Amino acid sequence: MPPASTGASTLTVAASTPSSPVTDTTDRLEPGRLGYRRMSFALFAAGVATFALLYSTQALLPAVSASFGATAGQASWTVSAATGALALCVLPLSALSERFGRRQMMTASLVIAVTVGLFVPFAPSLGWLIALRAVQGAALAGLPASAMAYLAEEVRPKALVAAIGLFVAGNSIGGMSGRILTGWVAQLWGWRAALGAVGLLAVACAVVFHFMIPRARHFTPGTLNPKALARTVGSHLANPLLRRLYAIGALFMTVFGAVYTVIGYRLVEAPFNLPQGIVGSIFLVYLVGTVSSAAAGRLVARLGRRGALYLAVSTTAAGLLLSLGDALAAVLLGLVLITAGFFAGHAVASSSVSRTATTGRAQASALYQSAYYLGSSAGGTLGAVAFHTGGWAGTVTLGLLAVLGVVSITLYGTRAARAERLRPGAVAPVQN
């Protein structure tokens, strides 16, 4: 069953005057200041809520399948519908954030998503569950791109990679805590109670965000105009570096979506036969993602952006290959490497988008988020199909193909940058 329509394609409003870049950075947020700490804590909480809600059914897919008599592919739509709806809605909602403000859009997104999350546990059928999850994903679409645009405008440029890394770290904590929470609650009281627990966790995070997020000081509102949106989006899509970054984000997320959608099915079957609570606890490896995403800034400083991407993709590929083993220790170590590589690569690619786009940052980030979550949706569904037809080896093959795509794009970017440097009178391009 495909994701429910979000109406994103018919939205007719957009920012005609994207918020202009700020040249005076003396009063921007930077590490060591109270405002930076408040901002980091608030966006960390928002990241926790976003990933906890967005992937709330992922660790529960075997239980959902059993409850509704559904296959892995059918149950996977409870994840893919949410990520697909987010991908469709992130661009129009980011345009609204250009008019009404990043802070306001992030707050509205959290409120609606949390409210829908309280109804999700009562879905009477798989179809209703998928529909509610699609609505929830559409609501969450206003948060990721707005958060990155907010950071690009409010944080000093030298601290941007680290600030985005902290937001991504919140994503990893949310993904981890949501899955662990649902795993143990489902084992004790069923998957519906587990979804209710995630909803309450998200409520707490939304309250923290509301009271902690600093007001925007460098946002300039624009008017709503669809032609301006088309021009801004067109200019971003015409930028070859941004196109490569969007493709890298989508491919990284294809790997991650496939692995974590299917891993529960693999671990509850022979030779592992793990109970639901233990399967949920496997997501403790997300802590590795918290560390690797927060360390992305240091990786870039030492290796450069392309060097950091090569390291991230190599780590991911090694994890995929290691996970083919039948020993539980090998599978767990493989998940650790996959998670570390994914979150590092995502932090580097997403921060590169914010650094590359000097105007229309919300739209640039929105396009990245659209590609990123389309990759998640495709990875979840294709990963489940690959698992159904070829077992875990099929899912790993899909992941390795996506990894090969990232390597090819990064190599092409390296060669293009070298050719640009050798061109007479050329200005050194921004690394991807």
Image (cartoon, helix red, strand yellow):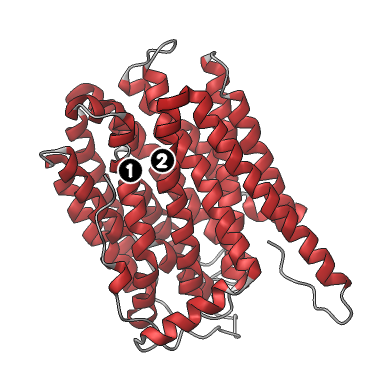
Q: 379 and 268: which one is in front?
A: 379
Name the residue at 43% across, 53% down.
373
Query: How many tags in the picture?
Result: 2
Residue 173, quarter of picture: top left
Name the residue at 39% across, 59% down.
87
- Residue 380 disc label: 2
Q: Are marks 1 and 2 in contact (CB under 8 Å)?
A: yes
Residue 229, quarter of picture: bottom left
Q: Where residue 111 sits: x, y (%)?
A: 23, 61
**What residue is pinned by disc 1?**
79
Rendered view: 407 above or below 149: above
Name the residue at 64% across, 49% down.
406
Q: Earlier in the sequence, mark 1 or mark 2?
A: 1
Q: What kind of residue is marked 1? A: Val
Crowding at label 2, few (<14), some or many (≥20) Cα neighbours within 10 Å? many
Q: Where residue 397 sits: x, y (%)?
A: 56, 32
Rendered view: 153 above or below 374: below
